[in-house]
Amino acid sequence: MSQQYDCCVYLGDELAAYGFGNDHPFGPQRHHVFKQAFYQQALQEKVAVLQPQSVDQNILELFHTHDYVEQVKQQSKFGIGYLDQGDTPAFIGMYEAASTVAGSVCDAIDRIIKKEYKRAFIPIAGLHHARRHIAAGFCVFNDCGIAIEYLRAQHDIRRIAYVDIDAHHGDGVFYSFEDDPDVIFVDLHEDGRFLYPGTGSESETGLGTAKGSKLNIPMAPHASDAAFMHAFEQAEQFLMAQGADFILLQCGADSIQGDPITTLSYSEKAHAYATQRLYKLANEMCEGRLLAMGGGGYNHDNIAKTWTAVVNEMA
């Protein structure tokens, strides 16, 4: 199979288990609506479909503190209380579900590095708000941060580009690597003056030796595809100037028009465009290595059409 396809996609109930119940915006249906659209469009004929994978605690602790991981394990047993100040409720089986998100990301990295595939997509992933010591914004373990640390620890890949087009600023990634000059950070998000988490101003470009390695592009509420594509040209030029050995894409569908908790007005064409451009950049810079993670998105129609558009471009 690995010879037949350049791209793989992870699907399975173990990934769908990451969610906060049917009444919560981040519920299990997000996986199911993508999966349904994926098969309706016969994308399984263009990409390999892989089973989700879990990961050991020591891998989680490449990014997260030991005490925090232990806290998640304990609260996962009974599903009581919150992991943060009130956004991220505990649920029974949370530790296993969040470990599967991170494990699938790490498995995809292994396969890309081993040249089984050039590209991979994981729909339930891109949990970019969690910090090293605490959950935030529906994110228990930050698989994006874990991916960066895993690339370094397991594969000795140091220079990594992280590109985030979710409506929300990827603050958990940004602040965890703000002083790291080898994490090239690019984030196009709804202006933080109007949307959670309120961060990601243009002036935030990195600290110390990392100054200039981060690019935050706040987008005005109701920004269109044209505005996105114009801004993405700047992002591309920045990435080309910086260079990287691996590209991570967080492609949250909450920046598509009609999302219930954001006000950006892109269509799925914006995400297809970004994927297409990063595909080309990856081929030029880093042997095609591109890993995309679904991220946010709380309108089910938007999830279905946006993530399938991303997979179409990757395939």
Image (cartoon, rainbow, N blue to C red):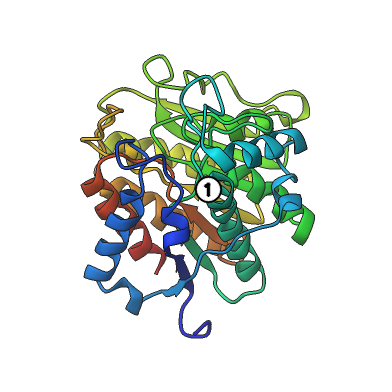
* Residue found at the far front of this picture: 78
Left/right of residue 268 with respect to residue 288 in the rendered view? left
User: Residue 221 in the image: x percent, y percent?
Assistant: 29, 23
**283 to the left or right of 270:** right
Circle count = 1
- Of residue 204 and residue 260, the one placed in the foreground of this image is 260
Q: Residue furthest top?
A: 193
Residue 211 in view (yes/no): yes
Q: For the point 72% across and 31% down, which residue is it?
A: 210
Whole-percent x and y of residue 160?
A: 66, 49
Identify which residue, 27 or 63, lies in the foreground.
27
The residue indicated by pointer 1 is 93
Left or right for 88, reference 77: left
Residue in view at x 69 percent, y 47 percent? 60
Above or below, 271 relative to 128: below
Q: Quadrant of the C terminus?
A: bottom left
Q: Please indicate, yes or no, whether residue 243 appears anywhere in the rendered image.
A: no
Describe residue 43's horizontal placement relative to residue 112 as left or right.
left
Which secondary structure lies at badge 1? loop
- Residue at 64% from the left image edge and 42% from the top image edge: 73
* Residue in front for this viewpoint, 267 or 81: 81
For the point 55% across and 24% down, the residue is 84
Looking at the rendered structure, the kind of residue marked 1 is: Gly
Q: Position of residue 298 (x, y in %)?
A: 30, 39
Residue 204, relative to residue 239: is it above or below?
above
Using a 10 Å C-alpha cutoff, classify the residue at mark 1 as few (fewer than 14 neighbours), some (14 to 19) or many (20 or more): some
